[in-house]
Image (cartoon, rainbow, N blue to C red):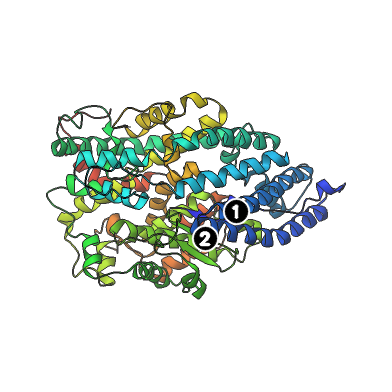
Amino acid sequence: MAVMKTLRVLTAIGFVCALCGCGSTGSSDAKTFLDEAEKKLFDLVLDASQAAWVQSTYITDDSEAVAARANERSIAESVRLAKGAVQFDKADLPADQRRKLNLLKVGLVLAAPSNPAESAEVTRLGASMEGRYGKGKYCPENKAGTANPCMDIAAVTKVLATSNNPAEILDAWRGWHTISPPMRKDYQRFVELANKGARELGFKDSGAMWRSKYDMTPDEFAKEVDRLWGQVRPLYVSLHSYVRWKLREKYGASVVPEKGPIPAHLLGNIWAQDWSNTYKLVAPAADKGYDLTEILKRRNTKPLDMVRYGESFFKSLGFAPLPQTFWDRSMFIKPRDRDVVCHASAWDVDNIEDLRLKMCIDITEEEFTTVHHELGHSFYQRAYNKQPLLFRDSANDGFHEAIGDTIALSVTPEYLMKIGLLNGAPDSSKDIGLLLSRALEKIAFLPFGLMIDQWRWRVFSGEIPPDQYNKAWWDLRLKYQGVAPPVARSEADFDPGAKYHVAANVPYTRYFLSFIMQFQFHKALAKAAGCPAPGADTPLHRCSIYDNKEAGARLNKMLEMGLSRPWQDAMSELTGQRQIDATAILDYFAPLQKWLDEQNQGKPAGW
């Protein structure tokens, strides 16, 4: 669940007129500044992207060093350019030039300090932490007469997803969290250096720099996130209460409390960010009617088949097929001979057509959805590749994450019938099962998607000091998710580092935004596709835009805009609204909300 877009992640830009003695600040000077920057940017981004690809798919000390050096060059140049752009702050410029200059100042994820030694250090630390995560393994102690091989993240994930043995689940959860304590000292130093670089650019800290890229002030954006959480929190609390008492029925009072937080390891996912794997434990009597994982496995589906299904969906909307290089250069399965970063991500290596998928695909319903999500990045990347280079990105980073999931919301029983995976669609009596299954993925994620950056923003600002990293992490998880660690944690641990996006310094609020916007997008596209049809009572959750060219054309029109205009314009283009709004997600899950409230009568709510 990530997009590797080097322009925004590494931001490698080399030409800085201001630092070469340019004295004029008119429109022609700004155009020269931007044109030459974009020209050199193309080559620098390509170099950095290729180095990062090798680092992620061939993890060695050498590949980390090569990627770190490429990243260092990229970041150093981008910081110099961001400082150089300031010379045009008071110039009267065309709107496109002004937007490009603003993007140069707010588009950074990491602003390395101008000191060369510190710049090299912070990029080396970043590469090292990501590499440590990618190589992370839990090696259980051998018991007499047994062989206990080391478990990578895929093996740990499988245990949490499939085991119903609390002791086995706890062991795997605790084991994965042993990979991150060695990162703690590096992360503290990384924060110090990242903040120094951000302050050199005029930001309060790195968190403020991240929040500045949303066409509003950092404080306005923080308030907007709080507003959206307020809209969806009641639905999450209802789901949390239902799942807690169902898990208590399964595991007993000694494992799951009647009131209070749910033990984090029992929710089917290492980070309790997606509760889909608890579905069989909490399913209603009227089950959703099918098990896509079983169907895929029974059909002997291969990883490449999973990707073909995703591509076919976009082709049905009128999008051109992916280029042959996508199939030649992507990584679809985990190699047997080396360490790789299995975390799914879509790559736009050359900002034109060299699109790639990096993923260790397993044949499950969750991975089927993930493939659709990642290909959403790929088709978005190609849609805006005719824009000027600085505009080759999504309207905001949440848009990029939302597009693929918007498509995945159309993975309905009716869609599965059309592609031959189901013989018939379940009747409406199965809808609560369908909605509960989706809520365990989508609604359960919302507070986790919010709290990751709530933690980092406070770390960057100094509100959370280094000696409280782990305590603050679990305080926020309790506040937002209502989950608690299954065993005692201390400041000897560094549980945030057991999450890829923290180790790799990837902003996370984008995912929270995307999980709300995707329903807003889905509702608008479903309407464009004529769903529900006049006189029909098809609910929103049974609408699919598969094979509808009108919906595809409307989607593509927004995708082609890239980052050329404020995200509010792109939102309006697709939905007719200029504000992110959770009303669609509440509409989508309205039948489930009513059902949950009925099931939870007499049960404790909240934590």
Identity, as a three-letter code, of the amino acid under mark 2: Trp
Q: Which of the two residues, 150 or 280, is positioned nearer the viewer here?
A: 150
The mark lying in front, picked from 2 and 1, is: 1
Toward the left, the furthest residue is 285
Q: Give left or right: position of 250 versus 362.
A: left
**Sooner in the amino-acid sequence: mark 2 or mark 1:** 1
Q: Give left or right: position of 283 versus 346.
A: left
Q: Which residue is mark 2?
A: 347
> Helix, strand, or loop for circle 2?
strand
Q: Is residue 204 visible?
A: yes
Cα–Cα gap, marks 2 and 1: 15 Å
Give the label on residue 67, or none. Answer: 1
Q: Relative to 384, is 433 above or below?
A: above
Look at the image and tell me in which quarter the C terminus lies.
top left
Percent x, y of residue 588 = 31, 50
Q: Give left or right: position of 431 versus 391.
A: left
Percent x, y of residue 94 = 73, 53
Q: Is residue 266 visible?
A: no
> Helix, strand, or loop for circle 1?
helix
Q: Residues within 10 Å of mark 2 (few under 14, many from 20)?
A: many
Percent x, y of residue 383 = 54, 65
Q: Residues within 10 Å of mark 1 (few under 14, many from 20)?
A: many
Identity, as a three-letter code, of the amino acid under mark 1: Ala
Q: Relative to 3, is 604 above or below?
A: above
Percent x, y of residue 490 = 39, 26
Give the label on residue 512, or none. Answer: none
Q: Residue at x 55, y 63 (%)?
A: 560
Q: Residue at x 36, y 65 (%)?
A: 545
